[in-house]
Amino acid sequence: MPAKLELQKRLAADLMKCGETRVRFDPERIDEIAEAITREDVKRLIEDGAIYKVHAKGVSRVRAREREEKKRSRGHGSRKGKKHSVVSRKERWILKVRTQRKKLKELREKKLIEPSTYRRVYRMVKAGAFKSVADMLAYLEANKLIRRPLL
């Protein structure tokens, strides 16, 4: 771009409220644009269409949509890995043990089980004695280790 059009480009960017990189000139009307030295002249050329601004490039949502799509299509028919490739054995174990320990802690804080019972059942949880929280509660009730029946 010739140096003589720097002023016009700066004024146009200011008037169109955009950056100088987005300002474009009509190649056939370059001489007319070069003569414009006041803001009024540049404003008139913008209205005539000799000076215009290109659309700002946005960030494409395509990759984001693909990620969202992957979350949606997780049914049995679209699974390709083995049984434990969706949630690994270890992750499943962690989830199970954490929920059981959380429930045990809750029972101890509400004084529904004694600290000695808590310790013994905690070790049983670690050993993998219970399939679920319900299984653990059934064990506690069957062995009368819980103070009052659960609601």
Image (tube, rainbow, N blue to C red):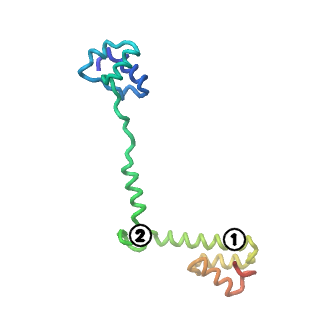
Whether residue 57 sits left or right of residue 120 in the image: it is: left
For the residue pair 147 and 88, the one nearer the viewer reads as 147
Instruction: Please tell me which residue lies in front, 89 or 55.
Output: 55
Amino acid type, label 1: Glu
Amino acid type, mark 2: Ser
Residue 46, percent across and down? 35, 22
- Residue drawn at point x = 67 percent, y = 73 percent: 104
Helix, strand or loop for disc 1:
helix
| Quadrant the N terminus occupies | top left
Among the 4 quarters of the image, the one containing residue 103: bottom right
Q: Looking at the image, is mark 1 or mark 2 nearer the viewer?
A: 1
Q: Residue at x 35, y 23 (%)?
A: 47
Q: Which of marks 1 and 2 is nearer the N terminus?
A: 2
Q: Which residue lies furthest to the left in this view?
A: 28
Residue sitting nearer the eye, 91 or 59:
59
The quarter of the image holding the C terminus is bottom right
Q: Does 18 sit above or below residue 89? A: above
Residue 57 located left or right of residue 91: left
Q: Mark 2 points at which residue?
A: 85
Residue 137 coordinates in the image, percent (x, y): 65, 80
Classify residue 120 as left or right of residue 2: right
Looking at the image, is 67 positioned above or below residue 143? above
Mark 1 Cα-neighbour bin, 10 Å: few <14, some 14–19, many ≥20: few
Q: In 3D space, how far apart are the residues under numbered discs 1 and 2 (Cα atoms)?
A: 32 Å
Query: How dense is the environment of label 2, judged by Cα within 10 Å: few (below 14), some, or many (20 and up)?
Result: few
Quadrant assignment, res 82:
bottom left
Name the residue beneath numbered marker 1. 106
